[in-house]
Image (cartoon, rainbow, N blue to C red):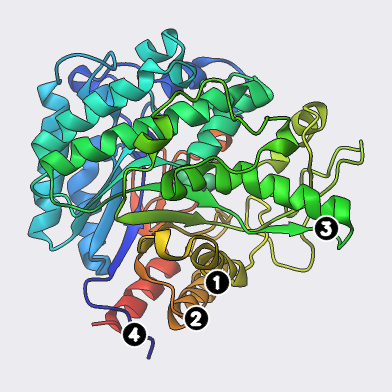
Amino acid sequence: MDEVPAGFLWGTATAAYQIEGAVAADGRGPSIWDAFTAEPGRVKNGDTGDVACDHYHRWPEDVALMADLGVGAYRFSVAWPRIQPDGRGPANAKGLDFYDRLVDALAERGIAPVVTLYHWDLPQALQDDGGWMNRDTAHRLAEYAAIVADRLGDRVTAWLTLNEPFVHMTEGYGIGTHAPGEALLLDALPAAHHMLLAHGLAVPVLRERSAAPVGLTNNYSPVWAASGAPEDRAAAAAFDVLQNRLFTDPVLLGRLPDMSAYGVAADGLPFVRDGDLAAIAAPIDRLGVNYYSPTRVRAPHGTPAAPEGGGSVLSEAGAHIEGAGLPFEDVPIDGHPLTGFGWPVVPDGLHELLTGLRDAYGDALPPILVTENGCSAPDDDPGRRDQDRIDYLDGHLRALHRAMDDGVDVRGYFVWSLLDNFEWAEGYDQRFGLVHVDFATGTRTPKASYHWFRERLARYR
Ligand code: IFM
């Protein structure tokens, strides 16, 4: 029987815009995702988060599902536009009340709340002023963090300031496949810096108001070179800098990685001001790690990489990347099963990632929470027999235990996701839930993976 340390957090994860719906309820302001989904052609089938899983109204049922599942923790995000409808100024009491009730209900069931402050739903009013391209947004996030921590700080088990700034920068500001839909390519780099600055400014704000550990969540991918050729190895190193190191070195080491592959001079980036890196490097207690699959890259060949069958989060945008003059090109990973999204299923990648973080950052690495792991699968079985998801989770849990046996300090693991939900540009097509949601009726039906995970969790008690 695999062991985990006392207090290990077994949980499921969600995010506000992906499940809550009720976008106009109780004074919530518009977010960039409301604006983006309203634009024709942005999201598959014209789907929006207007109703989603209607978690805003059905949350007691969802808490009961988690209690029945036997998880000890729940990672969810707070919707900034519910708390500050315009992204600044006084709190909207009804928005805070919603999360207050949720946190109390979780506590009654013995489920620890792990709160992400920002999971991509920026108030539209801040986007109107430039969004994450505007340095002021970092200060706004710190102000919002204070409001949330003042209200929930006595009951939250862990804080995560940001979710996946790499994906938000790349898809939201770099290639425009996510809200706010800007296609600035490498000119989007200020967005990354301002998000990291927001994280750094929020850390002391949270500490002043709450004893709970603080961290941020990145989406990590082990990067494989397509061959041993020096140019492919250089391409892999360059991609590793962009996806992994750019969002970790400043936080854990207080410095930028070598960005010369992107034409960035040794004296850094012009929008990084004196003192910023010290702020970003405020010590954290946890590193949130989201893992889905590795990425394989080669040196640019001038031929667009095949977007289907085994690429990373960037594959979909292969054509954009080709045009961007970037120092890498995504290539498919063969020889592994693929998820519904077409992402390769590589459980060993989780072991490689966790041990790689330990080796790269050593003593600077805080304990890890695996804040997301899971897969999408087609909605093609009325019996909800999602054996592919069971196999995925089983393989990744084995890899997790091997990494822990090898000395990596992991303190929690969260399945993405509790519910089928709004999968951003894919709308409702890609289903990640342990629980099936009928989006026409809101009906929840636990899948085979839910029952499997419940049995698995019972073994740890
Ligand atoms: O649904 C997303 C989530 O919002 C962030 N991490 C990856 C998940 C699957 O794509």
SS label for mark 3: loop
Tell me the CA gap for discs 3 and 1: 20 Å
Location of the C terminus (image quadrant) = bottom left
Residue at the spot of label 3:
226
Query: What amino acid does circle 1 point to?
Result: His
N-terminal of the two: label 3 or label 2?
A: 3
Q: Which of the pair 110/258 is nearer the observer?
A: 258
> Callout 3: few (<14), some (14-19), or many (20+) C-alpha neighbours within 10 Å?
many
Query: What amino acid does circle 3 point to?
Result: Ala
Q: Which of the pair 290/34 is nearer the observer?
A: 290
Which residue is situated farthest in the bottom direction here?
Answer: 1
Q: Is mark 1 within 8 Å of ligand 1?
A: no
Is 96 situated above or below 101?
A: above
Do the numbered discs 1 and 2 sit on residues whose CB atoms are within 8 Å? yes
SS label for mark 4: loop
Do the numbered discs 2 and 4 sit on residues whose CB atoms are within 8 Å? no
Residue at the spot of label 1:
351
Residue at the spot of label 2:
402
Q: Which of the pair 285/6 is nearer the observer?
A: 285
Q: Which of the pair 285/258 is nearer the observer?
A: 258
Image coordinates of residue 44 in percent, x first then y, are 60, 31
Do the numbered discs 4 and 3 sit on residues whose CB atoms are within 8 Å? no
> On the rendered structure, is 409 left or right of 46?
left
> On the rendered structure, is 201 left or right of 255?
left
Image coordinates of residue 31 in percent, x first then y, are 38, 20
Tell me the CA gap for discs 2 and 4: 11 Å
Residue at 13 percent of width and 51 percent of height:
211
> On the rendered structure, is 107 left or right of 76?
left
